[in-house]
Image (cartoon, helix red, strand yellow):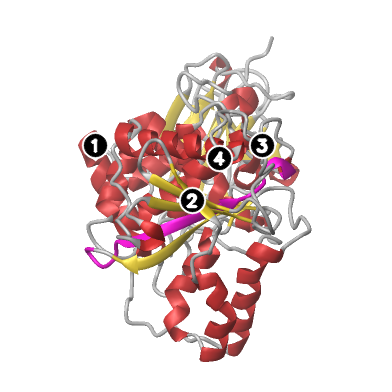
Amino acid sequence: MIKRIIFCLFLFSSSFFIYAFAVELKITEEYQQGLIQRVKDLYTNKAPISPLPKCGTPVMLELFMVKDKLSPQTLELLKAYLDRPSLQTSYNTPGGHFKIHYDTSGANAVYHPTEDNNPTNGIPDYVDRCAEIFDYVWAKEIDTMGYREPPSDGSSGGDSRYDIYIVNLGYGYLGITFAESSATPWWNVTSYTEIANDFSLYGYPNQYDLIGVTAAHDFFYAIEFGYDIYEGFDPYPNWRPYWMEMSATWMEDQAFDNVNDYINYLPFFFDYPWWSLKTFTDDFNDPKAYHCYASCVFPIYLSEKFGVDIIRQIWEECGEIPFGNTFSAIDTALAPFGADFDSAFKEFLVWNLFTNTRVEPSNYYSEGSSYPGINISSQQRYSTYPVNVASVDSMPENLASNYVRFTPLAGPGGLAMYFDGADAAEWVVPVIGYKSGGGHFIDAFDLGIQQKGSFDFYNWDDYSYIYPKKCICICSASQRLINPKVFTES
C-alpha cells in the first residue's frame, strides 16, 4: 500500500477590534417596517421558512436596543409585543427559582391542557415537565457550572422568581428571551422568557428533549444578559450577537449531552468555512442565519481543550466592561494556559479537519464522528506541479478559512510551498501532515511583516491519507500565490 500525506495549510486574518460608541443609529421608515414584520413573524409565521427551528431572541433584543428611537406609530404597533403576556394561571416550580405562566384554553393553551396524569396535581403534565426541565437547567447552569444568577426583576410577574411564559409562537420559533430593564451595573439587564406551547410539531420522538435544549439555550441568554447585554455590538451600532448565540447553543449540549440537536446546524459551519466566525443575520431565508448556531463548535473546542469553566471565565471577563470585548475577554481567560485568541483560533481550524471520517475523539472533538467533514471543493484540488493557486472559490472573510487539496506523486520526496498573503491582513498558516491512526505532523509557515513565507515538507511517504484517492490537503485562505513544487530528497 502506498502511503501518502495530507497537508493542511490554514490561514485566517485578524484585525484590530475598534469600537466606536458615539455613532448615531439612524432609524429609517423602511427599517422600522422591516422590524415590525420580523417581530410579528415570531408569533404569526405559519409555514416553515427553513427545515430547522430557530431562536427569536435576537429580533427582540434588537427591538430592545432601538425602541427609544422608533416613531410613536411604530411603538404603538409593537406595544403588544413589548408587554409581558397576560395568561390565565401560574405555577411555582418545585426548585423555587421559576414561575411558569400558562393557559389551559384559547390560542395559548398548552399542549394537551387536560392531561394531568403524572402526577395528578391539577397542573397539566406539559407544565409539570417544563417545570422539571427548567429546574434542572438552573441546577446545571447556576449551581453546578457556577454562572451568575440572572438579575432579579423584583415583583414583575408576581414575585422575584424568574418568569417563564408558555405561549403560541409562530412555526419554527421555540423560545424568546426578552430584555426588560437595567440592573447594576447598567449593562446588566433583567429578563423573562417565552417558550412555545407545543413542541410536538418538529418531528422529535420526545418533544421534551427539544424543550430541554430550548430551556438550556434561552435561560443561558438570561444569564448572558446578567453579564453584558451589549456584548453583541460589534462595533456599535451593529447588532450581531454571534458570541451570545454560539454560547447559548454550546450550553444546550452541556445541559443535555444526549440530545445533540446542535449537530443539525453544523453543515452551516462546515460547508462554509470561508464565512466569518462573526457572521450573523436574523433573516432565516438566508443560510447565514444558521451560522451562529453552527459556530457553537468554537466554544465546544474551547471547553474541550481548556476545560468547561473557560466559557464562564470568558463571560465573566465580558461582564467587566460594557459592549463588545469578546476577543480580549478570550485573551484574558486563556492567558493562564499560555494561549490567546489568535493561537486558539489557529488550533480550532486544525480541529475542524478532524471530523467525520477523520475523527479522533481522544484528541479533537469528542462527538466529531457525527459532524460533517470540512468542505473542500472540487475546484480546490490539484494533482500537477508546479501550480499557481491565485484564488479560491470563495475568498474567506475575517476569522475564516479555505481548504485546498493537493495530490502527491508516488515515492519519496516532499513539497516546497510559498505563500504570499494580502498585506492588509494578518495570516496564520498551519501545516498538517496527516497520518491515519495518529502521529500527525503539525507546523506553520513563518511569515514576515509582508505576509510572505515558504515551507518545505519532507518525507511525505511517511504519511497516509484517508480520502478515497491519495492527496495532500492544503487548507488556506485568501492569497495571491501558493506555488507547491515537488522535490526529491537527497
Tell me the number on the disc at residue 123.
4
User: Separation of disc 3 and disc 1 at Cα?
Assistant: 56 Å
Dot 4 surroundings within 10 Å: few (below 14), some, or many (20 or more)? some
In the rendered structure, which amino acid carries the disc numbered 1?
Gly
- Residue 250 point in image, percent of width and height: 47, 40
Instruction: Name above or below for residue 279 compared with residue 263.
Output: below
Circle 4/circle 3 CB separation < 8 Å: no
Residue 194 on the magenta segment: yes
User: Separation of disc 1 and disc 2 at Cα?
Assistant: 50 Å
Q: Residue at x 33, y 52 (%)?
A: 150
- Residue 162 point in image, percent of width and height: 38, 51
**Disc 1: which residue:** 338
Dot 3 surroundings within 10 Å: few (below 14), some, or many (20 or more)? some
**Disc 3: which residue:** 115
Q: Secondary structure at mark 2?
A: strand
- Residue 166 point in image, percent of width and height: 57, 52
Quadrant for the N terminus in the image? top right
Tell me the number on the disc at residue 90.
2
What stretch of residues is rendered in magenta? Answer: 184-201
Closer to the N terminus: mark 1 or mark 2? Answer: 2
Mark 1 vs mark 2, foreground winner is: 2
Q: Which one is in front, 473 or 290?
A: 290
Q: Secondary structure at mark 3?
A: loop
Circle 4/circle 1 CB separation < 8 Å: no
Dot 1 surroundings within 10 Å: few (below 14), some, or many (20 or more)? few
User: Separation of disc 2 and disc 4 at Cα?
Assistant: 10 Å
